[in-house]
Amino acid sequence: MRILLIGPPGTGKGTQASLIQKKMGIPHISSGDMLREAVNKKTSLGKQADRYMSQGSLVPDDLVIEIIIDRISQPDAREGFLLDGFPRTVPQAQALDKALKQSKLEIDHVLQIFVPDEQIIIRATGRLIDPLTNKIYHKKFKPPPVEIADRVIQRNDDTEETLKKRLAKFHADTGPILKYYDGIDLLYKIPGMGKPEEVESRIYKEIGISS
């Protein structure tokens, strides 16, 4: 099964990606991680991407798609994949569809994990990180153990003002993409509130997989 996962930070998207990956045995492919991996491995495509990334420029769509097609053609993605972080625009979505069809593949489902903005802000502004283990805690929902409480930190960009700007940009960027996939009957809007296993169950129910 080939799935696109869409949602801003704070919706629990990463948690759901891990749960789906574990249950279905398909790789979770992040476009950002994939680009960095191609660059680090110094592949032919990675070297081309690095020319743009090292200059702080955006990697052209056709090159990103070529890297994605190369990645999802690997043996571990033969039975499917979970793609996260791409496409970001309708032309990217259309180009991805075209490239997949040329490889005799297609996207099966597009999952939008939806959480109201005010709840995302509550989640994110309370987020705490242990710099030694990178484990994530929350001031309200998951306080850190007493023995490490003095060393946890909050990210500088986890402020209400910054988050509101990021969310506004996310909605502006993804709105047309969601409309595009809804128009071809691939979009599933999954409520992201509740326990992770409850959200996971909603996903499987929508895409017809037994939980």
Image: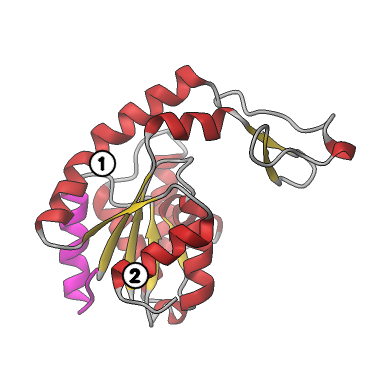
Q: Which stretch appears magenta?
A: 91-107
- Horizontal and vertical percent position of residue 62: 24, 54
Of all residues, the one furthest to the top in this rendering is: 161
- Horizontal and vertical percent position of residue 8: 40, 41
Which image quarter: residue 175?
A: top left
On screen, residue 38 versus residue 100, left or right, reads: right
> Residue at coordinates 46% horizontally, 21% vertically from top-left?
162
Measured Cα–Cα span from mark 1 to mark 2: 24 Å
Find disc 1 in the rendering and name its residue. 174
Which image quarter: residue 44?
A: bottom left
Q: Nearer the viewer, residue 155 or 62?
A: 155
Please say whether residue 97 is one of the residues in the magenta stretch: yes
Please say whether residue 92 is one of the residues in the magenta stretch: yes
Marks 1 and 2, the one that precedes in the sequence = 1
Observer able to see residue 67: yes
> Residue at coordinates 68% horizontally, 32% vertically from top-left?
139
